[in-house]
């Protein structure tokens, strides 16, 4: 089974850059997109050919042109839930939950905390509410995969210039501590478990020729509950695939 996550930074803009053709060629079982910045009725059939996908779920933000996630399934999920059940977060269209193949998949666009302290607090509260929800589900016996743009680089290996970014949202200690907390509560960063010393990034600013110079951050993850790790075969970062300031990441799971 192949699952692809990708922050497309605007699905219509990504389509013009060939991103969706690349996705369709991958023939993934599930595709989770973040920061779609559009509603399905704003897309033409040519902008997204849904053939081959039995289920398509959209969760756009209430605010036009902002945030939003979408998930595409080759096989209809057993259950789908939009959001986390908290209006404060759900108005921004950040979460799609789906259950199939023995696990619950969270497709998430985590908040960015760079604007001001209010948005940083919002981001940290989002991490807290999500972890509470996951702990409840784990207590009920569910296996979980959380994927998407986490908007946080976990450790120094996960960005090019860690020392210069200690006070930058996305690498602040208070944000990184939340990734630690997920791991302490039974989640595994699947990529880092498989490749403990490998240096790859999933996001590059559009400024300063950062992508050409590979000055990037690893912000896009698959966090899996520990019981699923024996089923995970690989995590692939497609750093050469263009179309967004993020690149796609693939999880291969039995």
Image (cartoon, rainbow, N blue to C red):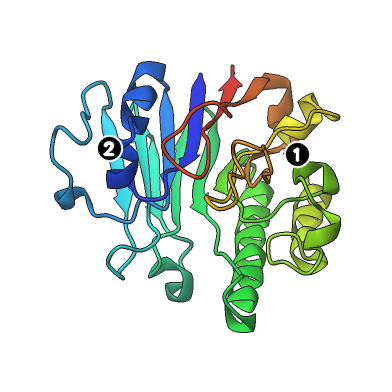
The reply to whether residue 76 is visible in this rendering is no
Residue picked out by circle 1: 188
Measured as percent of width and height from the top left, residue 183 is found at 79, 48
Query: Is residue 97 rendered to the left or right of residue 132?
Result: left
- Badge 2, how many Cα within 10 Å: few under 14, some, many 20+? few
42 or 124, which lies in front?
42
User: Residue pushed farthest front?
Assistant: 208
55 or 10, which lies in front?
10
Query: Is residue 171 rendered to the left or right of residue 74?
Result: right
Rendered residue at 13%/34% (across/down):
45
164 or 157, which lies in front?
164
Residue picked out by circle 2: 16
Measured as percent of width and height from the top left, residue 43 is found at 18, 45
Rendered residue at 64%/63% (across/down):
127
Rendered residue at 27%/67% (across/down):
64
Q: What element carries label 2?
A: helix
Measured as percent of width and height from the top left, residue 102 is found at 54, 30
């Amino acid at each position: 089974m192949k699952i692809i996550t990708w922050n497309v930074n605007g699905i219509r803009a990504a389509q013009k850059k060939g991103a969706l053709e690349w996705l369709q060629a991958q023939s993934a079982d599930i595709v989770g997109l973040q920061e779609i910045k559009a509603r399905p009725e704003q897309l033409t059939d040519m902008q997204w050919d849904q053939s081959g996908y039995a289920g398509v779920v959209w969760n756009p933000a209430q605010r036009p042109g902002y945030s939003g996630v979408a998930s595409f399934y080759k096989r209809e999920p057993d259950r789908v839930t939009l959001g986390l059940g908290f209006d404060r977060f759900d108005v921004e269209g950040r979460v799609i939950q789906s259950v199939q193949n023995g696990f619950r998949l969270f497709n998430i666009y985590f908040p960015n905390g760079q604007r001001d302290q209010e948005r940083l607090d919002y981001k940290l509260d989002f991490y807290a509410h999500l972890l509470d929800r996951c702990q409840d589900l784990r207590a009920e016996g569910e296996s979980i995969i959380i994927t998407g743009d986490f908007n946080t680089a976990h450790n120094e290996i996960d960005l090019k210039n860690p020392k210069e970014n200690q006070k930058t949202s996305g690498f602040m200690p208070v944000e990184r501590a939340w990734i630690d907390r997920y791991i302490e509560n039974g989640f595994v960063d699947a990529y880092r478990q498989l490749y403990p010393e490998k240096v790859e990034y999933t996001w590059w600013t559009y400024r300063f020729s950062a992508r050409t110079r590979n000055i990037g951050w690893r912000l896009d993850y698959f966090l899996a509950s520990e019981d699923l790790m024996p089923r995970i075969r690989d995590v692939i970062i497609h750093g050469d695939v263009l179309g967004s300031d993020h690149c796609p990441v693939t999880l291969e799971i039995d």
